[in-house]
Protein backbone atom coordinates (compact mmCIF):
# COMPACT_ATOMS: atom_id res chain seq x y z
CA UNK A 1 0.00 0.00 0.00
CA UNK A 2 1.18 3.51 -0.79
CA UNK A 3 0.75 6.23 1.83
CA UNK A 4 1.81 9.77 2.58
CA UNK A 5 1.97 11.73 5.85
CA UNK A 6 1.89 15.53 5.75
CA UNK A 7 4.12 16.29 8.72
CA UNK A 8 3.18 19.02 11.20
CA UNK A 9 6.22 20.01 13.28
CA UNK A 10 7.48 16.66 14.64
CA UNK A 11 4.03 15.24 15.14
CA UNK A 12 3.52 13.28 11.94
CA UNK A 13 6.82 11.41 12.13
CA UNK A 14 5.67 8.50 14.37
CA UNK A 15 2.83 7.77 11.96
CA UNK A 16 5.17 7.83 8.97
CA UNK A 17 7.57 5.48 10.76
CA UNK A 18 4.72 3.16 11.70
CA UNK A 19 3.54 2.85 8.11
CA UNK A 20 7.10 2.32 6.89
CA UNK A 21 7.77 -0.32 9.56
CA UNK A 22 4.72 -2.23 8.36
CA UNK A 23 6.20 -2.43 4.88
CA UNK A 24 4.17 0.28 3.19
CA UNK A 25 5.72 2.78 0.77
CA UNK A 26 5.62 6.56 1.06
CA UNK A 27 4.52 8.03 -2.26
CA UNK A 28 2.66 11.33 -2.49
CA UNK A 29 1.46 10.97 -6.06
CA UNK A 30 0.12 7.43 -5.75
CA UNK A 31 -0.90 7.40 -2.07
CA UNK A 32 -3.82 5.10 -1.28
CA UNK A 33 -4.07 6.84 2.09
CA UNK A 34 -2.93 10.34 3.07
CA UNK A 35 -2.68 11.44 6.69
CA UNK A 36 -3.03 15.11 7.66
CA UNK A 37 -2.95 16.80 11.05
CA UNK A 38 -5.97 18.81 9.90
CA UNK A 39 -7.82 19.02 6.61
CA UNK A 40 -8.95 22.64 6.94
CA UNK A 41 -7.77 25.59 9.01
CA UNK A 42 -10.26 27.74 10.89
CA UNK A 43 -9.51 30.93 8.96
CA UNK A 44 -10.45 29.29 5.66
CA UNK A 45 -13.77 28.26 4.15
CA UNK A 46 -12.27 25.45 2.08
CA UNK A 47 -10.12 22.36 2.67
CA UNK A 48 -6.39 22.71 2.23
CA UNK A 49 -5.37 22.52 -1.40
CA UNK A 50 -3.21 19.47 -0.62
CA UNK A 51 -6.33 17.65 0.55
CA UNK A 52 -8.10 18.46 -2.69
CA UNK A 53 -5.10 17.23 -4.69
CA UNK A 54 -5.04 13.93 -2.84
CA UNK A 55 -8.78 13.45 -3.20
CA UNK A 56 -8.45 14.02 -6.94
CA UNK A 57 -5.78 11.31 -6.99
CA UNK A 58 -8.17 8.88 -5.31
CA UNK A 59 -6.53 8.85 -1.88
CA UNK A 60 -8.36 8.27 1.37
CA UNK A 61 -7.99 11.13 3.87
CA UNK A 62 -7.31 10.42 7.53
CA UNK A 63 -6.47 12.76 10.42
CA UNK A 64 -3.71 12.24 12.99
CA UNK A 65 -3.39 14.43 16.13
CA UNK A 66 -2.42 18.04 15.40
CA UNK A 67 -1.63 18.42 19.10
CA UNK A 68 -2.05 16.29 22.20
CA UNK A 69 -5.68 17.45 22.49
CA UNK A 70 -8.73 16.11 20.68
CA UNK A 71 -9.49 17.97 17.41
CA UNK A 72 -11.81 20.52 19.03
CA UNK A 73 -12.07 22.71 15.88
CA UNK A 74 -14.53 20.18 14.49
CA UNK A 75 -16.94 21.37 17.19
CA UNK A 76 -18.72 23.81 14.89
CA UNK A 77 -15.64 25.72 13.66
CA UNK A 78 -14.61 23.53 10.71
CA UNK A 79 -16.99 21.29 8.75
CA UNK A 80 -16.82 17.54 9.33
CA UNK A 81 -16.58 16.51 5.70
CA UNK A 82 -17.69 13.20 4.23
CA UNK A 83 -14.25 12.41 2.81
CA UNK A 84 -12.74 11.90 6.29
CA UNK A 85 -12.21 8.15 6.54
CA UNK A 86 -10.90 8.21 10.10
CA UNK A 87 -9.84 10.59 12.86
CA UNK A 88 -7.11 9.15 15.08
CA UNK A 89 -6.82 10.34 18.68
CA UNK A 90 -4.42 9.53 21.50
CA UNK A 91 -6.47 8.28 24.44
CA UNK A 92 -9.86 6.84 25.33
CA UNK A 93 -11.00 10.12 26.90
CA UNK A 94 -10.19 11.87 23.62
CA UNK A 95 -12.31 9.37 21.72
CA UNK A 96 -15.20 9.88 24.14
CA UNK A 97 -14.96 13.65 23.66
CA UNK A 98 -14.55 13.48 19.89
CA UNK A 99 -17.52 11.14 19.55
CA UNK A 100 -19.63 13.92 21.10
CA UNK A 101 -18.71 16.67 18.64
CA UNK A 102 -18.10 14.39 15.62
CA UNK A 103 -20.96 11.90 16.10
CA UNK A 104 -20.95 10.60 12.52
CA UNK A 105 -17.20 10.22 12.10
CA UNK A 106 -15.05 7.16 12.59
CA UNK A 107 -12.75 7.83 15.55
CA UNK A 108 -10.00 5.40 16.60
CA UNK A 109 -7.53 5.43 19.50
CA UNK A 110 -3.96 5.19 18.23
CA UNK A 111 -2.07 5.50 21.53
CA UNK A 112 0.69 7.81 22.72
CA UNK A 113 3.14 8.56 19.88
CA UNK A 114 5.63 11.28 20.83
CA UNK A 115 8.06 10.00 23.44
CA UNK A 116 8.94 6.95 25.45
CA UNK A 117 6.88 6.92 28.63
CA UNK A 118 8.38 6.71 32.10
CA UNK A 119 6.84 5.92 35.47
CA UNK A 120 5.89 8.78 37.77
CA UNK A 121 8.72 9.85 40.04
CA UNK A 122 8.19 12.16 43.00
CA UNK A 123 11.25 14.20 44.02
CA UNK A 124 12.56 14.07 47.57
CA UNK A 125 12.67 17.85 47.44
CA UNK A 126 11.62 20.32 44.76
CA UNK A 127 14.82 21.88 43.44
CA UNK A 128 13.91 22.80 39.87
CA UNK A 129 10.58 24.08 38.48
CA UNK A 130 10.12 24.34 34.72
CA UNK A 131 7.50 26.76 33.40
CA UNK A 132 6.59 26.46 29.72
CA UNK A 133 4.40 29.51 29.01
CA UNK A 134 1.70 29.31 26.37
CA UNK A 135 3.44 30.49 23.22
CA UNK A 136 2.25 32.86 20.53
CA UNK A 137 1.05 31.78 17.10
CA UNK A 138 0.03 34.84 15.14
CA UNK A 139 -0.82 36.48 18.46
CA UNK A 140 -1.90 35.23 21.88
CA UNK A 141 -5.43 34.88 23.22
CA UNK A 142 -5.99 37.03 26.33
CA UNK A 143 -6.66 34.17 28.74
CA UNK A 144 -3.28 32.67 27.82
CA UNK A 145 -1.47 36.00 28.23
CA UNK A 146 -3.06 36.51 31.65
CA UNK A 147 -2.21 32.99 32.82
CA UNK A 148 1.41 33.35 31.70
CA UNK A 149 1.77 36.68 33.49
CA UNK A 150 0.17 35.44 36.71
CA UNK A 151 2.28 32.28 36.87
CA UNK A 152 5.45 34.28 36.20
CA UNK A 153 4.61 36.70 39.00
CA UNK A 154 3.68 34.00 41.47
CA UNK A 155 6.81 32.00 40.72
CA UNK A 156 8.86 34.98 41.95
CA UNK A 157 7.08 34.91 45.30
CA UNK A 158 7.09 31.13 45.69
CA UNK A 159 10.76 30.87 44.68
CA UNK A 160 11.67 33.18 47.57
CA UNK A 161 9.70 30.97 49.95
CA UNK A 162 10.79 27.54 48.74
CA UNK A 163 14.24 28.25 47.30
CA UNK A 164 14.01 26.28 44.05
CA UNK A 165 15.44 27.12 40.63
CA UNK A 166 12.98 28.42 38.02
CA UNK A 167 13.54 27.69 34.35
CA UNK A 168 11.38 29.49 31.79
CA UNK A 169 11.21 27.46 28.58
CA UNK A 170 9.74 29.89 26.08
CA UNK A 171 9.19 29.81 22.33
CA UNK A 172 9.66 33.25 20.80
CA UNK A 173 9.91 36.68 22.40
CA UNK A 174 9.06 37.14 26.07
CA UNK A 175 6.93 40.31 26.16
CA UNK A 176 4.17 39.13 23.77
CA UNK A 177 3.70 36.18 26.15
CA UNK A 178 3.30 38.34 29.26
CA UNK A 179 6.88 37.77 30.46
CA UNK A 180 10.06 39.77 30.90
CA UNK A 181 13.66 39.14 31.89
CA UNK A 182 14.23 38.45 35.57
CA UNK A 183 17.65 37.92 37.11
CA UNK A 184 16.66 35.02 39.38
CA UNK A 185 15.15 32.90 36.60
CA UNK A 186 16.94 30.91 33.92
CA UNK A 187 15.54 31.38 30.40
CA UNK A 188 15.73 28.66 27.76
CA UNK A 189 14.62 29.12 24.15
CA UNK A 190 12.49 26.11 23.27
CA UNK A 191 11.44 24.62 19.95
CA UNK A 192 8.37 22.80 18.67
CA UNK A 193 10.28 19.55 18.33
CA UNK A 194 8.86 17.30 21.05
CA UNK A 195 12.15 17.25 22.97
CA UNK A 196 11.88 16.19 26.61
CA UNK A 197 15.38 17.03 27.91
CA UNK A 198 14.16 20.09 29.87
CA UNK A 199 11.27 18.08 31.29
CA UNK A 200 13.58 15.29 32.42
CA UNK A 201 15.75 17.75 34.39
CA UNK A 202 12.76 19.25 36.23
CA UNK A 203 11.08 18.26 39.48
CA UNK A 204 7.82 20.02 38.52
CA UNK A 205 6.51 21.23 35.15
CA UNK A 206 3.88 23.95 34.65
CA UNK A 207 2.45 23.83 31.12
CA UNK A 208 -0.54 23.25 28.87
CA UNK A 209 -1.21 21.44 25.61
CA UNK A 210 1.32 19.07 24.09
CA UNK A 211 4.14 20.05 26.45
CA UNK A 212 1.95 19.27 29.45
CA UNK A 213 1.18 15.85 27.99
CA UNK A 214 4.88 15.23 27.35
CA UNK A 215 5.63 16.05 30.99
CA UNK A 216 2.99 13.63 32.28
CA UNK A 217 4.18 10.94 29.87
CA UNK A 218 7.73 11.33 31.18
CA UNK A 219 6.53 10.85 34.76
CA UNK A 220 7.31 14.39 35.92
CA UNK A 221 4.94 16.01 38.44
CA UNK A 222 2.84 18.43 36.42
CA UNK A 223 0.53 21.42 36.88
CA UNK A 224 -1.77 22.36 34.00
CA UNK A 225 -2.82 25.78 32.74
CA UNK A 226 -6.36 26.88 31.73
CA UNK A 227 -7.67 23.33 31.88
CA UNK A 228 -11.29 24.37 32.47
CA UNK A 229 -11.44 27.04 29.77
CA UNK A 230 -12.54 26.27 26.23
CA UNK A 231 -9.71 26.01 23.71
CA UNK A 232 -9.46 28.91 21.28
CA UNK A 233 -6.93 29.81 18.59
CA UNK A 234 -4.50 32.66 19.14
CA UNK A 235 -5.48 34.33 15.89
CA UNK A 236 -9.05 35.69 15.61
CA UNK A 237 -9.82 34.07 18.97
CA UNK A 238 -13.08 36.00 19.42
CA UNK A 239 -14.57 34.28 16.37
CA UNK A 240 -13.65 30.70 17.19
CA UNK A 241 -14.96 29.19 20.41
CA UNK A 242 -16.07 25.53 20.25
CA UNK A 243 -19.86 25.36 20.26
CA UNK A 244 -20.48 22.60 22.83
CA UNK A 245 -17.34 22.60 25.00
CA UNK A 246 -19.36 22.22 28.19
CA UNK A 247 -20.44 18.74 27.04
CA UNK A 248 -16.96 17.24 26.78
CA UNK A 249 -14.18 19.59 27.98
CA UNK A 250 -14.18 17.99 31.43
CA UNK A 251 -13.28 14.62 29.92
CA UNK A 252 -9.67 15.64 29.23
CA UNK A 253 -9.14 18.56 31.65
CA UNK A 254 -6.04 17.85 33.74
CA UNK A 255 -7.03 17.73 37.45
CA UNK A 256 -4.26 20.02 38.74
CA UNK A 257 -5.02 23.39 37.19
CA UNK A 258 -3.18 26.61 38.03
CA UNK A 259 -5.16 29.22 39.96
CA UNK A 260 -3.75 32.48 41.32
CA UNK A 261 -2.52 32.09 44.89
CA UNK A 262 -2.53 28.28 44.87
CA UNK A 263 0.92 27.56 43.45
CA UNK A 264 2.52 26.28 46.67
CA UNK A 265 -0.36 23.92 47.31
CA UNK A 266 -0.39 22.75 43.68
CA UNK A 267 3.33 21.95 43.79
CA UNK A 268 2.71 19.87 46.92
CA UNK A 269 -0.20 18.05 45.27
CA UNK A 270 1.69 17.45 42.02
CA UNK A 271 4.66 15.89 43.81
CA UNK A 272 2.57 13.88 46.30
CA UNK A 273 1.02 11.49 43.77
CA UNK A 274 0.44 10.94 40.09
CA UNK A 275 -2.86 11.81 38.44
CA UNK A 276 -2.99 8.21 37.30
CA UNK A 277 -6.63 8.02 36.21
CA UNK A 278 -6.19 11.04 33.97
CA UNK A 279 -2.98 9.64 32.52
CA UNK A 280 -4.59 6.28 31.76
CA UNK A 281 -7.56 7.90 30.02
CA UNK A 282 -5.75 10.65 28.11
CA UNK A 283 -2.32 9.21 27.34
CA UNK A 284 -2.78 5.50 27.86
CA UNK A 285 -0.36 3.05 26.30
CA UNK A 286 2.44 3.82 23.88
CA UNK A 287 1.37 3.61 20.26
CA UNK A 288 1.87 0.18 18.71
CA UNK A 289 3.32 1.06 15.27
CA UNK A 290 2.22 -2.14 13.58
CA UNK A 291 -1.17 -1.93 15.25
CA UNK A 292 -1.64 1.60 13.94
CA UNK A 293 -0.57 0.63 10.43
CA UNK A 294 -2.94 -2.32 10.62
CA UNK A 295 -5.88 -0.03 11.41
CA UNK A 296 -5.01 2.22 8.47
CA UNK A 297 -4.76 -0.75 6.13
CA UNK A 298 -8.02 -2.22 7.43
CA UNK A 299 -9.90 1.03 6.79
CA UNK A 300 -8.39 1.25 3.31
CA UNK A 301 -9.39 -2.35 2.50
CA UNK A 302 -12.91 -1.74 3.78
CA UNK A 303 -13.18 1.25 1.44
CA UNK A 304 -12.29 -0.93 -1.54
CA UNK A 305 -15.30 -3.15 -0.83
CA UNK A 306 -17.76 -0.26 -0.88
Image: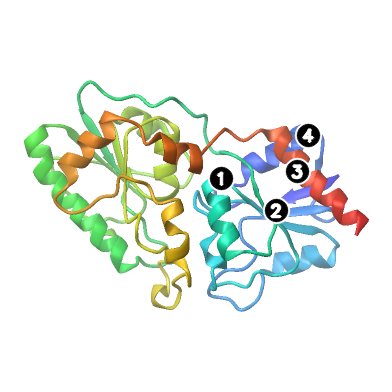
Q: Which mark is residue 224?
A: none
Q: Which residue is mark 4?
A: 22
Residue plotted at (17% across, 54% down): 260
Residue 59 lies, with reference to residue 242, above or below; the image says above
- Nearer to me, 246 or 192: 246
Q: Considering only order in the chain, which callout, 3 or 4, is on the residue closer to the N terminus?
A: 4
Q: How many marks?
A: 4
> In the image shown, does 235 or 189 lie closer to the viewer?
235
Q: Quadrant of residue 25?
A: top right
Q: Nearer the viewer, mark 4 or mark 3?
A: 3
Q: Which mark is first along the chain, 4 or 2?
A: 4
Tell me the residue that label 2 is attached to.
35
> Would you say residue 204 is visible in this rendering?
yes
Mark 2 / mark 1, whichever is N-terminal: 2
Q: Quadrant of residue 135?
A: bottom left
The alpha-carbon separation of the residues under discs 4 and 3 comes to 11 Å
Between the C-alphas of marks 1 and 4, the distance is 24 Å
Residue denoted by label 1: 92
- Helix, strand or loop at label 4? It is loop
Between tags 3 and 1, which lies in front? 1
Mark 3, Cα crowd under 10 Å, few <14 / some 14-19 / many 20+, is: some
Q: Residues within 10 Å of mark 2 (few under 14, many from 20)?
A: many
Amino acid sequence: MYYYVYNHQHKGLPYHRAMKAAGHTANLRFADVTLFDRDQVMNSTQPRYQVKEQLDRGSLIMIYPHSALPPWWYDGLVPVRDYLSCVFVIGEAHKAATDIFMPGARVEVAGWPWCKQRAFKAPNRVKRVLFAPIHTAGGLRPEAFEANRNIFRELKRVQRMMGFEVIIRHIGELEPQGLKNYRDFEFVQGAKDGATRDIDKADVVIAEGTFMYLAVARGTPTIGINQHIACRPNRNYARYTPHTWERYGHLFAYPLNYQWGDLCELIEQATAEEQSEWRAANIGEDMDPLGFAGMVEEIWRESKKM
